[in-house]
Image (tube, helix red, strand yellow):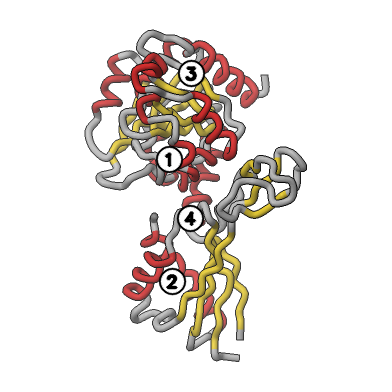
Amino acid sequence: MHELPVVLDIIRIVTEEANEQQLTTINSITIVLGELAAVMDESVQMYFELLAEGTPCEGAKLIFEHVPAMLRCSGCKQEFPHQKSFFCPHCGGDGILIKGSGRELYVKAIDSNDN
Amino acid sequence: MEVLIMKKLLEANDKLATNNRDYFRSRGLYVINLMGAPGSGKTTLISAVAKSIDIPIGVIEGDIASSIDAERLQSEGIASVQINTCGECHLDAQVIREGAEGLSIKNGVVFIENVGNLICPAEFDLGEDLRLLAASVPEGDDKPFKYVPMFSYIDVIALTKCDLKEAVGFDSINFEKGLRILSQAPIFEVNCKKGDGVNALATFIKEKYNDFRGK
């Protein structure tokens, strides 16, 4: 839910990279969001459109990659991604959250016209 | 041309939290981040545990406004400092360092009583050693199903106000069912007003403190 500081940080990171690499046009920014990171695409998009103005990020498209939380089956011990159900797709056993998973929150990559 | 970045967002808080951890260790302080919804009994829990444990206790109290909780604990002889966030819905690592410098205890346990909130505190590492959730019976037994980030974040649960289970129809089996999908955190059932169950939690904390000090 703290999308405002998240967006400020996105802009800071991308601007630093653009300055270091002397990039003039940022076409897109890929952000990885874990299921349990509590960050909503729509809110990030809304703040980004306001705050990117006048920065190297202005006009860049945001691409969101969502990462599910990972579960481990209490029965067969196999790991599987959370996709609506907590039941193991292999044996039907109860899945248990792997502690710390699904909290990813990072800038993965940017795409630029510059060479 | 794609440029790989791979940089964490909001990393500033994590770095400050790591600094806090080192700072607390240098003072021999074992730090507990106590979280829970408003009215879940956090302050009462601290008060009850402090009476049951023979280790120096300090408290960093976090609230949006007022110093009600810090004053209450001070009146009971428990060293406390108050942080007012002025609207921020959680404590973060930066304000904790400022608060910690207002406590003079060494070689003891510090409780950080976080802002009453079942959502946002689960996103901010403060530099603590233990994440304790005060989950109160009147809040209902379905909260682990609904507040997944918090219940998956914590290390131990104090189920408070257990004397009200029958009055509110609390289903302990359902509560544990929801919790066990997310966490192996032990549950300590307490009634802090009467002191029921507090010794077991105090013993747990003391063992953690002793392990921390390498005894």
Q: Which amino acid type is marked by label 3? A: Glu
Q: Chain of mark 2?
A: A
Give neighbour class at mark 4: few <14, some 14-19, many 20+ (Cα, 10 Å): few
Q: How far apart are labels 3 and 1 at the CA level?
A: 31 Å
The number of numbered badges drawn on the structure is 4
Q: How far apart are labels 1 and 2 at the CA level?
A: 27 Å
Image side of residue B66 versus residue B125, left or right: left
Query: Which residue is the site of mark 1?
Result: B97
Give neighbour class at mark 1: few <14, some 14-19, many 20+ (Cα, 10 Å): some
Q: Indicate which disc residue B189 carries.
A: 3
Q: Are marks 2 and 3 in contact (CB under 8 Å)?
A: no
Name the residue rendered at 61%, 50% in the picture: A101
Query: Which residue is the site of mark 2?
Result: A11
Residue furthest to the left: B66
Residue A18 locus on image (x, y percent): 51, 80
Closest to the observer: B128 or A86?
A: A86
Give neighbour class at mark 2: few <14, some 14-19, many 20+ (Cα, 10 Å): many
Tell me the quarter of the picture where residue B169 sits: top left
Query: Which residue is the site of mark 4?
Result: B12
